[in-house]
Amino acid sequence: GAGVSQSPSNKVTEKGKDVELRCDPISGHTALYWYRQSLGQGLEFLIYFQGNSAPDKSGLPSDRFSAERTGGSVSTLTIQRTQQEDSAVYLCASSLGLGEAETQYFGPGTRLLVL
Amino acid sequence: EDQVTQSPEALRLQEGESSSLNCSYTVSGLRGLFWYRQDPGKGPEFLFTLYSAGEEKEKERLKATLTKKESFLHITAPKPEDSATYLCAVQAGGNNRLAFGKGNQVVVIP
């Protein structure tokens, strides 16, 4: 079946602009995660959604970052007033949401470049 | 805070030259240790999950093992198509998030 999809694949923006990144999880997966991968760094957790529960936002680096998940499926990560240090690959992952230590399946990522 | 350290950072192998990648972790209450493969410009691709010390899993030329402090990914007789960055991640405590190491970049030369 279809895997996790993300759009756009690449995004170039100017400092100070807002950007929206989209994630479509695997059908039937109730858990959705956002991570950030910066050059030379490991993947960094941003936010986690599970069903109708309140999201775990503990990894968001500043209040310029927000995310929502509509209808328990598609998620949008929004970065307001982008800064150059926001340049990174933003990865979305999903899992079944049934229990512990589930496999998280990743999308191809959105490569964000802030000029 | 969960810590994951991978070594070596980069590794060049001749085709057929077996080697091992190390992932050391410090966590409270390990729930699972994950290995992923990442090719340039792509998202991580799942390889293995290990849950408890002593567990081993194999897939083609790859074998993953787990102790209470570290995991090894053994690559036996590698081929050029095994060239990739291998990522180790842990899930621990009450968190569902994964904590990743920085990866092992492997290049297999024909």
Image: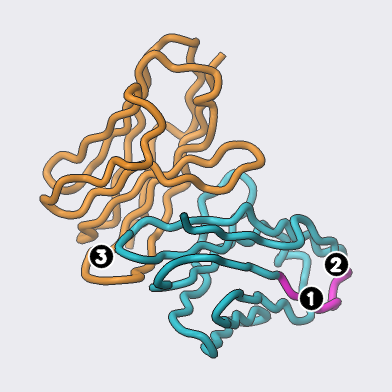
Q: Amino acid at mark 3?
A: Leu
Provide the residue designation for mark 1: B19
Look at the numbered disc 2 and give the secondary structure of its residue: strand
Within 10 Å of disc 1 (Cα), the crowding (few <14, some 14-19, many 20+) is some
Q: Which chain is cyan?
A: B
User: Which numbered disc, 2 or 1, marks the residue that appears first in the sequence?
Assistant: 2
Residue B61 image position (x, y, % from top left): 68, 80
Provide the residue designation for mark 2: B13
A99 above or below A75? below
Q: Badge 1 sits on which subunit?
A: B
Question: Which residue is painted at 81% across and 61% down in the image?
Answer: B11
Residues at marks 1 and 3, common chain? no
Task: Decide if residue A63 is on the left or right side of residue B38.
Answer: left
Look at the numbered disc 1 and give the secondary structure of its residue: strand
Question: Which residue is painted at 47% across and 46% down in the image?
Answer: A108
Residue B65 image position (x, y, % from top left): 59, 82
Residues under numbered marks 1 and 3 in contact, where contact means CB atoms less than 8 Å apart? no
Task: Decide if residue A76 is on the left or right side of residue B12.
Answer: left
In which quadrant will I find the N terminus of chain A?
Answer: bottom left
- As for residue B15 lying within the magenta part, the answer is yes
Within 10 Å of disc 3 (Cα), the crowding (few <14, some 14-19, many 20+) is some
Q: Which chain is orange?
A: A
Residues under numbered marks 2 and 1 in contact, where contact means CB atoms less than 8 Å apart? yes
Residue A44 image position (x, y, % from top left): 48, 45
Provide the residue designation for mark 3: A96
Question: Which residue is painted at 50% across and 28% down in the image?
Answer: A112
